[in-house]
Amino acid sequence: MARRRCVECVYYLKRSRYCILLGRRVEDPEHPPCVKQREEKAEKPKPQAQALAKPVAANGPQAPQARAIAQQAAAAKPVEVPMRVAAEALGFNYAPTGIRELDEALGGGFIRGKTYLVAGETGAGKTIFSLQFLLTGAVYYDEPGVYVAIDEPADQLLRGLRRFGWDVTPLIKEGKLVFLDMRTHFSKIYMRDERRKIEPKYVIESILKAAKKARAKRLVIDPVAPLIYGGTPDDVLYVREFLREMVFAIERVGSLTTVMTSEIPTGSKKLSRFGVEEFLASGIIVLGMEEVKGEILRVMYVRKARWAPAKPVKFVFDIEPGRGIVIKGLLKNFV
């Protein structure tokens, strides 16, 4: 069997040469340390029961070697120290998005328990991005997800997913994915109580109730603006307080990593519908389309990322049926 390399592993972050699984930097990606550990473990004789109970001396014979390694690490150039390690020292861990290059740029993915904004013009790929984020959690990390459908009825969305090559029916039956049709839900509240505006507490209660029931770890609100019933672009104070209360309530749960999508008007330089969503988010991923040499390319870049070593680079991507967003390279290589 051919020896596996780090570059072929989903846990390896190429830019920082960092292994998420082992929690350390890889010196030689061609010789994965995990493979070496398995080989050494297989060759090592089984210890006796008495030896297992024997404590290891803190200042034993390997202490000088450990100090030497620590001194070498301290002498390394600062730019070579992966910032993900520094972030983890603050107690962060990450929810991979399912887009390897983006996860690498963010140092591992989205910080768990925080809220992220995915912004873009119509047709930029916001819904596919959001669903890819949920599917990654449900399939690979055993993290149930809740998708809050706003603009499109949930049943139509599911039919579209099947045509795209993502049949999520098994995941729904297993309780790994829940689709909450908020448009129908709030229409009933609106008609019954004759409210001009839906109070934030009703939005929050409904979302958190669905998330709690599903034991969700990931949440998508797609898009966020229509939740603000009665709010207008001129009513900035109402919109700001509505979103602030909702985001803070969701983040107080502590275990929900949230993606909100927001449509950017064509030709606008804004990052969100109301201009306040981006200030509440821990990170902003912008999706768009640019013309290069007469060809329209889909482009993605990280506009904001708290506690992440994100470089200001643009990725070119395609949307492929059954796969979702697939990075093709850096925009500078297509110009």
Image: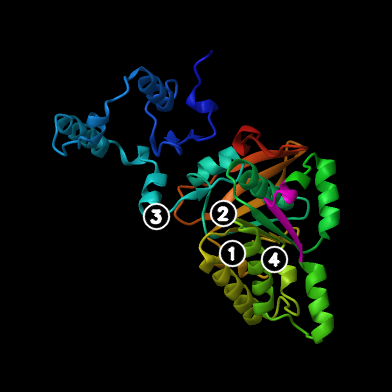
Identify which amino acid the numbered label 3 is placed on: Gly
Give the tally of numbered discs.
4
Q: Which mark is residue 91?
A: 3
Residue 226's image quarter?
bottom right
Q: Which mark is residue 224?
A: 4
Q: How far apart are marks 2 and 4 (CA)?
A: 18 Å
The numbered mark, 4 or 3, whose residue comes first in the sequence reads 3
Highlighted range, magenta = 171-181
Q: Which residue is drawn at 40% across and 51% down?
A: 87
Identify which amino acid the numbered label 1 is placed on: Glu
Residue 174 place in picture, x, y as percent: 70, 48
Instruction: Give the class, few, some or many, for how many residues have Cα within 10 Å of label 1's Cα (few <14, many ≥20).
Output: many
Residue 331 place in picture, x, y as percent: 63, 38
* Residue placed most toward the observer, 198 or 209: 209
1 or 4: mark nearer the eye: 4
Q: Quadrant of the N terminus?
A: top right
The kind of secondary structure element at disc 1 is helix
Q: How far apart are marks 4 and 3 (CA)?
A: 29 Å
Can residue 201 be seen in this snapshot? Answer: yes
Q: Mark 2 points at which residue?
A: 303
The kind of secondary structure element at disc 4 is loop
Q: Name the residue under label 1.
A: 278
The numbered mark, 2 or 4, whose residue comes first in the sequence reads 4
Cβ–Cβ below 8 Å for labels 1 and 2? yes
Q: How far apart are marks 3 and 1 (CA)?
A: 24 Å
* Residue placed most toward the observer, 128 or 237: 128
Q: Residue 117 carries which label?
A: none
2 or 4: mark nearer the eye: 4
Cβ–Cβ below 8 Å for labels 3 and 1? no
Q: Residue at x 78, y 74 (%)?
A: 186
